[in-house]
Amino acid sequence: MLSNQSPRRKKVLTRTFAGILLCILSTSTSLWGQRYQVGDIVENFTLTNRATNEPVSLSDFEGKVVFLEWFAYWCPFCQAAAKQVKQGIVDHYGGGGNPNGVPVLHVALNLEPDNPGFTDQFITEHSLQLVLQDTDASLASKFHVGGQPIFAIINGVENSTSHEQWELIYSRLGYGADNQPITEFRQAINSVEAGISVEAPSITQHPTSQNLATGSELTLSVQATGDELTYVWKKDEQTLEGQSSATLTIATSTLADSGSYTVTVSNAGGEIVSSVAEISVRLSFEDYLADTGLTGNDAFIQADPDADGYSNVFEYLAQTNPNDSSSTPAMSLQFKQTDEGLMLEAIFPTNELTIGYTVRVEASMDPSFTTDNSTMHSFDSEGKIETLIDLNKELFARLVANPI
């Protein structure tokens, strides 16, 4: 049985009964499409805690079976229900939750806006612990309209094997004089299975930093353990659209692809962020020549179109202009007599924006550098060479650029 009295009107005149009934039916029909049905996912809501005046949301009850009970203090069926729900639900599940170990939370919702003293008396009499205010029935109307009490049971357990989180598993309008509803309530509550524990992902191999030339393929990958993993790649803290697998691929890289890359690996158990992979995309030798406008024979690697004594590859490594003879690499190469002996000194600061070639000094007794006894000397991180030479092996020196 249920009460169709409005919380604001306790008396119904006989001569207006038909009109009131029609209004109730009309309201029910107009809201039918907005009502939750069993199996629907209940959207998060926020109401006010009657005792503390603080906001309380459905999401605050995560991990529990949520038993909602709407009441009005003057409603006789609400009074009957409150007593039996206290014994049959609140006390019954108070110790350890349902048979599957899921905690059960009873939430009372007050529909009566007037006479707060009587509502307080109702709350005290039935030992209601958590009472929320729904005096405009804004939430109640999403479940049932036209009376009270109203009951709704919602699963708040994530990864439950029986129900989706926030699924409405039971709904009822009205309450009978016997314990039959309690049996139905328990059946619904007991049907909720505990959530499956999902192990959070762990990264076993992080993406690595790289230097690469424009036009080449950029590939970053991550290896991680865990079930049902998802991946979100970011560059400089900005999410990269379309990059949602364990491997990030950019088919043709540009200078704009330089930056700091990370990937967030997640599943239902949690998430983990990879270490940062620093990507430096540098202008390729081919793109460098294209930018200078050189064509034909002038665009060969060994060509020297500005006749300054430095071929294109050395101009590229120094990032000078191969079309301008006044723009030359800051290079020097000499033999220098010291107290320790004859020393080879060389300077060639390779620009950090270049890639694909390395420059070294080749020393030999043969001015044509055709013999097999040449010695190769590498520049240090500052672009310098200072080394004593063997006069029996090294009398001539030259710069040599080789592809890496």
Image (cartoon, grey):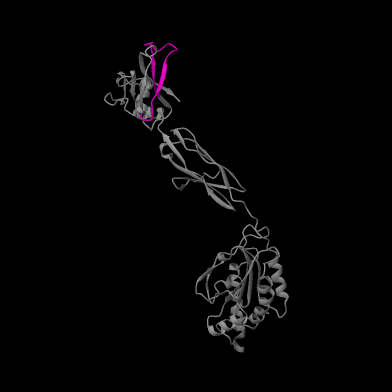
Instruction: Specify the quadrant of the image occupied by residue 17.
Output: bottom right
Residue 259 location (% of width, % of height):
43, 41
Residue sitting at 41 percent across and 27 percent down? 286
Which quarter of the rendering shows the N terminus?
bottom right
Residue 70 location (% of width, % of height):
60, 75
Q: Nearer the viewer, residue 54 or 303?
A: 54
Residue 249 location (% of width, % of height):
51, 38
Instruction: Specify the quadrant of the image occupied by residue 149.
Output: bottom right
Position of 212 relative to 145 (above/below):
above
Which quarter of the rendering shows the C terminus?
top left
Position of 30 relative to 233 (above/below):
below
290 horizontally vs 265: left or right: left
Q: Is residue 374 magenta?
A: yes
Instruction: Specify the quadrant of the image occupied by residue 128.
Output: bottom right
Residue 35 location (% of width, % of height):
60, 68
Which residue, as the protein is rendered here, is positioned at the far bottom? 14
Position of 125 relative to 220 (above/below):
below
Q: Nearer the viewer, residue 64 or 71?
A: 64
Which residue, as the protein is rendered here, is positioned at the far left? 326
275 horizontally vs 1: left or right: left
- How many numbered callouts? 0
Residue sitting at 69 percent across and 63 percent down? 100
Residue sitting at 26 percent across and 25 percent down? 326
Q: Nearer the viewer, residue 370 or 245?
A: 370
Q: Which residues are magenta?
A: 359-382
Q: Is residue 131 magenta?
A: no
Which residue, as the protein is rendered here, is positioned at the far front? 339
